[in-house]
Image (cartoon, rainbow, N blue to C red):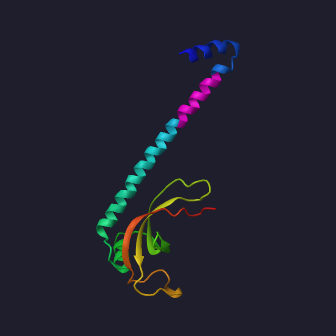
């Protein structure tokens, strides 16, 4: 209360003080509201990601072949892509995009995928580097690669 009284008294001496204080308060409150709104939206998106992961994990158990997993995805018209070297074990993987996150300033995109990670049963050569129908599903997880980063 004393602070407010001092500001009001000084407002008579410096007419710019009251609008400046009001502007600072408005900016601070707006930043807090925006931050809270973004945090809530992120929490909702993450719940959706976990729900997608749970659904795929329930339907596609480790031990299935790549052919079985990809046939499952194709029957659901799911667009996926093959990549190499996902996770700690550097598994071959199929990625299915489930969302996007705000990318940091040094990245151009922030996609979120469900990664179906496979280990090779047969040797992968350069001609068939990514996909062998015999690859075995090891795990299903959320994958955020941070693509397009400097």
Within the image, what quadrant is residue 134 found in? bottom left
Residue 95 horizontal/vertical position (percent): 45, 69
Membership of 51 in magenta stretch: no
> Which is more toward the observer, 78 or 123?
123
Segment tinted magenta in the rendering: 19-31
Q: Which quadrant would the C terminus be assigned to in this image? A: bottom right
Within the image, what quadrant is residue 18 found in? top right
130 lies above or below 98: below
Residue 80 horizontal/vertical position (percent): 44, 71
Residue furthest to the left: 58
Residue at point 58% right, 32% down? 27
Residue 66 horizontal/vertical position (percent): 38, 78
> Which is more toward the observer, 120 or 116?
120
Residue at point 56% right, 59% down? 109
Give the number of marks.
0
Residue at point 40% right, 49% down? 44
108 lies above or below 64: above
């Amino acid at each position: 209360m004393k602070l407010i009284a001092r500001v009001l008294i000084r407002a008579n001496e410096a007419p710019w003080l009251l609008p400046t204080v009001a502007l600072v308060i408005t900016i601070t409150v707006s930043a807090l509201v925006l931050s809270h709104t973004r945090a809530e939206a992120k929490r909702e998106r993450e719940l959706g990601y976990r729900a997608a992961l749970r659904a795929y994990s329930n339907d596609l158990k480790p031990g299935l072949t790549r052919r079985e997993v990809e046939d499952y995805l194709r029957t659901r018209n799911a667009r996926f892509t093959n990549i190499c070297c996902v996770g700690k074990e550097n598994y071959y993987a199929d990625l299915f995009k489930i969302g996007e996150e705000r990318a940091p300033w040094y990245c151009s995109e922030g996609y979120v995928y469900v990664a179906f990670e496979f280990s090779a049963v047969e040797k992968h050569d350069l001609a068939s580097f990514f996909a062998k129908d015999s690859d075995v599903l090891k795990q299903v997880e959320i994958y955020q690669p941070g693509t397009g980063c400097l």
